[in-house]
Image (cartoon, coloured by chain):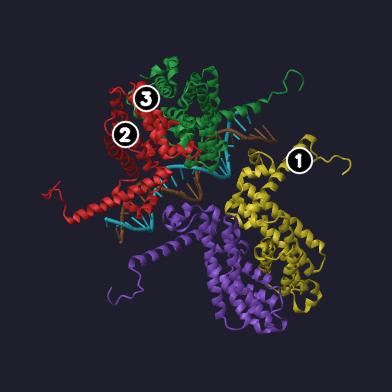
Chain colours: A red, B green, C yellow, D purple, E cyan, F brown
DNA sequence: TATGAATGAGCCTTCATTCAT
DNA sequence: AATGAATGAAGGCTCATTCAT
């Protein structure tokens, strides 16, 4: 990454153009995500997206093939965030399998929280997508949830977790993470993000931890109350 | 008007009309549910509902005020099924708190299974409902999930379950039940209804059971593998 | 009406049936008129008419060919009232041409008042009528306004009225009569039926009376203030 | 940006857009007026308006909020024409009150003639308007008929006209003006615009002129025959 | 690159009319 | 004679998409 001006460098004009295109793309994606998250992709018109982004309708079609493409891009954007942030969080958690699992779950929740309801779009709007887009998303979902499965497997192999159905547990944890934005639906009283994550983590570990390892993670388990 | 004809008899015309109206209503509700579950209520046209039900568009408006009403009716229909079947299942399960809890969870799953994805509409389509409709649904959800909370509380009081956050656990169990129709999204391999229910039950009990009571419910816990 | 049972007498059953049919017809006509007058024929649905009349939709089609026919019947009904009441009023007014003219105008206003806005339907809804229906109405209008023209002509011939364009004056008087239900549109302050008729009569006579005959009709002329 | 280009110049694009918008607006208004006059606003579909204007349905909604708005705009358009042309005609008529009155009446008739039956919509279609729209129209009607009342008052004050009910007379004159497009309904024979105006003016003046001033306006009075 | 006027298919809803009962 | 369930064409309106500028 040092000297030697890589051959891939673009001339300044080209760079500026790329930058603009990139900026536009993000600007549109962000506007679309914000509206779609709030109202569901069906309720959001291209005009609304254009207005939110401060550009004209026509411009959207320069960057995205149409509404379906835009929706797909919004979803892929969220999934990419999983792909980037979850492995990083796991790695940062150190070597202990349980700590890593807790970190992974928390990372999922955080991505979902920062993208609010957008994650919900994944399943909700599947019918608006082309078969190809649907395949892309399914593949990305499997890919981005793989770290979770891996970390569970590690825990089992290390003898810290009971030998459970890895796929099912990963499935459940993803559900609980994705259900965070729905909390206001069920809980009248305020339930903060921290509490939600800690309590769900505690519940999950109560189910997964080998009995004789429970006291090692008392700090994680006791959050449940 | 002499003897022989019970006073409670409706005249045949009236009776037939009631039957017809009921049949129509169910027919329409079923068609609407099927399509809305599959594609989301927004993507389903009234024409499509009519076609699916084998009637004309105009007829729908004799039975439902419009599209919003129809959606609301579909959702309420599911929630009503919860309200009827879950308490019955709990009662039929006998006195043991854990058995009752397992029965309640299974009952939720069964209603959701028999109404396929319709249960999902509840949270998905909230934007399409009137404030009044939304209130109705929220109220019904709280009401119909109350048996689950009650049964958990019983378990805790009986000292069989660990003292957890009842609301949160109920929330999670409902999520797992409602997530059953999504299983095809995450699980490539086939996962039957029985396996799904048994494994989820096992996981849940692993998290909830007091350690010293675990061996009493070994038959429920061992399904997890 | 005593003995002798005229040959035209129907047997009781037939009579009752005729009576029923007649009653139904009037009942429907009255309901239709009431609604159409208030909202315009286009805004009134056949269901609304049926409901107003306390019968089923289907029954209307036994008595009238359809909505157009019903509208036509309502209009003809009003025109018939002109044909019946105006000549009677003129005759009852005696021999004086001016008194007869005033009586004719008043009679028009009264019919229009008792049929409220229905008279307006005549011109308003012409596009809803078949050519044949339109012809019927035009013919009836000419017929029913003939007495007015006659009475004006009498006045001119008698030297009481100035020799004006009879058709135009009749046209104007009909307009003023038909405009009575619109009065609330223009007049904020209350203007009663009596005042309206008297003042319009006074204005008309001011235009029509021969100068040297004015003092004979001072009582009619002075209402104008 | 140097000299030669006046600062007040709009850039061409903006100017063209304004022109286009105005042209479109008039084009749509004219098409709508033409159809609504002929068939009543209720019978005219937006599709028909679009077709008549040679544009697509959707475009109408860029310029008018909907059908109600369109109707309101058509009506307001006529009333605006009154507001512009009537005062101008009165002023151009000079100082004589009677000449001014005649000019005012003629101006009303001319506006109505050039907008054909559109003026009729005012009273006919009140049911299709919002309360707000109705208020707008009533206010405009009062405003635009004020010149007529003023000119009548002037005549009375000058001692040329008899002291009549100003509101009622103005009401009648407006009616006669608005009734011009209905003439084909009542008059089999052809009655030209000139004849109509002259004869109605003559009749009106016959009713309004002070006896001793009649000979001064013999040219206006004698048109009545 | 960017605009936004314009299109037109499609949606929800209404309602005149029919017909089996 | 009377009902009212059922139909389906048509209307008002929206919005994804295109294209001339």
Q: Is residue A32 above or below residue D172?
A: above
Q: Quadrant of the C terminus of chain C?
A: bottom right
Between the residue at mark 2 and the residue at mark 1, the CA separation in whole angstroms equals 78 Å
Single out the mark in the foreground, 1 or 3: 3
Residue for badge 2: A141
Residue D118 position, x and y percent, is 55, 62
Residue A133 vs residue B184, the one in the foreground: B184
Residue for badge 3: A214
Asked if badges 3 and 2 are on one and the same chain, I answer yes
Secondary element type, mark 2 = helix
- Residue at the image point whose x is 34% and y is 27% from the top: A216
- The chain that hosts pointer 3 is A
Single out the mark in the foreground, 3 or 2: 3
Residue for badge 1: C19
- The chain that hosts pointer 1 is C
Q: Quadrant of the N terminus of chain C?
A: top right
- Residue at the image point whose x is 42% and y is 53% from the top: D56
Neighbours of disc 3 within 10 Å: few (<14), some (14-19), many (20+): some
Residue D205 position, x and y percent, is 67, 77
Q: Earlier in the sequence, mark 3 or mark 2?
A: 2
Residue B78 position, x and y percent, is 51, 30
Q: Is residue B26 above or below residue D168?
A: above
């Amino acid at each position: 990454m040092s000297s030697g001006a890589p051959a891939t460098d673009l001339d300044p004009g080209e760079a500026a153009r790329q930058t603009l295109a990139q900026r536009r793309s993000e600007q549109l994606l962000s506007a679309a995500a914000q509206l779609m998250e709030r109202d569901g992709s069906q309720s959001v018109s291209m005009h609304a997206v254009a207005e939110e982004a401060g550009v004209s309708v026509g411009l959207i079609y320069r960057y995205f093939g149409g509404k379906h493409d835009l929706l797909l891009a919004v979803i892929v954007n969220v999934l990419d965030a999983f792909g980037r942030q979850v492995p990083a969080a796991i790695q940062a958690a150190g070597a202990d399998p349980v700590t890593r699992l807790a970190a992974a779950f928390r990372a999922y929740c955080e991505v979902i929280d920062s993208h609010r309801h957008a994650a919900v779009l994944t399943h909700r709007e599947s019918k608006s997508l082309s078969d190809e887009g649907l395949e892309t998303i399914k593949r990305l979902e499997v890919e981005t949830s793989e770290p979770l499965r891996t970390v569970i497997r590690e825990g089992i192999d290390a003898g810290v977790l009971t030998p459970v159905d890895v796929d099912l547990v990963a499935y459940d944890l993803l559900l609980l993470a994705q259900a965070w934005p729905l909390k206001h639906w069920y809980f009248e009283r305020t339930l903060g993000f921290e509490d939600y994550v800690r309590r769900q983590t505690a519940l999950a570990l109560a189910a997964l931890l080998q009995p004789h390892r429970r006291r090692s993670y008392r700090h994680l388990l006791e959050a449940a109350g």
